[in-house]
Amino acid sequence: MVNVSSIVLGKGGPRVPVVGLGLWQAGFKMWGPRDEDALREVREAISLAVEYGLTLFDTAEVYGHGFSESLLGEVAGNRDDVVVISKVAGYRVTRRGVVKAVEGMRRRLRRDAVDVVLHHWPPSVHSSVCSVVRALEEAVERGLAKYIGVSNYPEDLLERAVECVKRHEILVDQVQYSLAYRVVERGLKPLAERLGVTIMAWSPLAKGALAGKTVADNKARKNDPVFEAASTDEELLDVLRRVADRLGASMAQVAVAWLIAKSAVPVVGFRKKRHVEEAVAAAKLQLPSWAVRELDRASEKYVSRWGGKYGAVQNLRWVPSPIQMLVLRLMGGV
């Protein structure tokens, strides 16, 4: 067991490690082969993470159409020391749809209740945020989940979600956030802090670019503008490399530790045991103030480059929910 720092989610949620581990990469083929050798290493990595005390896992029903949830449930589903966050697809906007989805994820995860259930992306413009929030609350009332939150909700919709709750707080808003995507600092992060909502950061390494990856060698990296920008930003990568060298750490560890210094909870994707070891090292790394300042300056362009407000996956709001569902089912998930 490694001594990993912890944080309370929201104002009164569970205490979790400052770094989470995400199973998108583990569960879907766009990140690489899903053969038995690859899956065996994922299972070993999950067990290693628990052994180290990195017990916060993030998954979703659309990751491989439930495959990632089943994989996690197989290895760690019955462990009381593990905290599982899973996400209901954004196309689910009715009480029946949300509750049924949480029932399914509970079975796949092999848990009496999912620790935290998030709505994966905002509902379409034809649906109500309040209906979604009430559905999440009903899942808690039925004992299917313990806490609720949202994901990819921009400023106005996060504020609306918090206004809609009747009995249970919105613990987190899980959003894209990294040295190469800092638009959340313009309005969303200050708002979340004021509301008592924890910011969780997906893609904290910009799909590997901030760990030194320069080639878009899989479907997940291809056509990703943030990966492309970060992987070709010699100024940012040079500063990140120099800071890492001075601290005796890796670039990935420093990039993740920078998010921790910003009071966010990074969710690091993994497929191998070495990815878990990197995440553990990042959780233990406390960046000195000079390092944070240097990284802030080198990445300042990314505060405004991606727009005036949080915009990741917001284009889905203009696609009716039934069409979203059909496309994702035909794809087998994401």
Image (cartoon, rainbow, N blue to C red):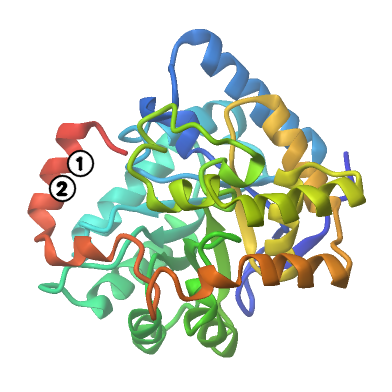
Q: Is residue 54 visible?
A: no
Q: Position of residue 169 (x, y in %)?
A: 49, 79
Q: Amino acid at mark 2?
A: Met
- Position of residue 288 in the picture relative to residue 258 (left or right): right
Q: Position of residue 320 (x, y in %)?
A: 9, 61
Specify the label residue 325 is tagged with.
Answer: 2
Contact between marks 2 and 1 (CB within 8 A): the answer is yes
Above-or-below relation of 37 to 222: above
Quarter of the figure that contains the C terminus: top left
Q: Amino acid at mark 1?
A: Leu
Q: Characterize the local packing of mark 2: few (<14), some (14-19) or many (20 or more) Cα atoms within 10 angstroms.
A: some
Q: Position of residue 294 (x, y in %)?
A: 77, 68
State which quadrant residue 44 falls in.
top right
User: In this view of the protein, which residue sits in the foreground, 71 or 225?
Assistant: 225
State which quadrant residue 98 falls in.
bottom left
Above-or-below relation of 135 to 187: above
Q: CA distance from mark 2 to mark 1?
A: 5 Å
Q: Which residue is mark 1?
A: 328
Above-or-below relation of 308 to 16: below
Query: Which residue appears at 73% of the width and 45% of the height?
Result: 251
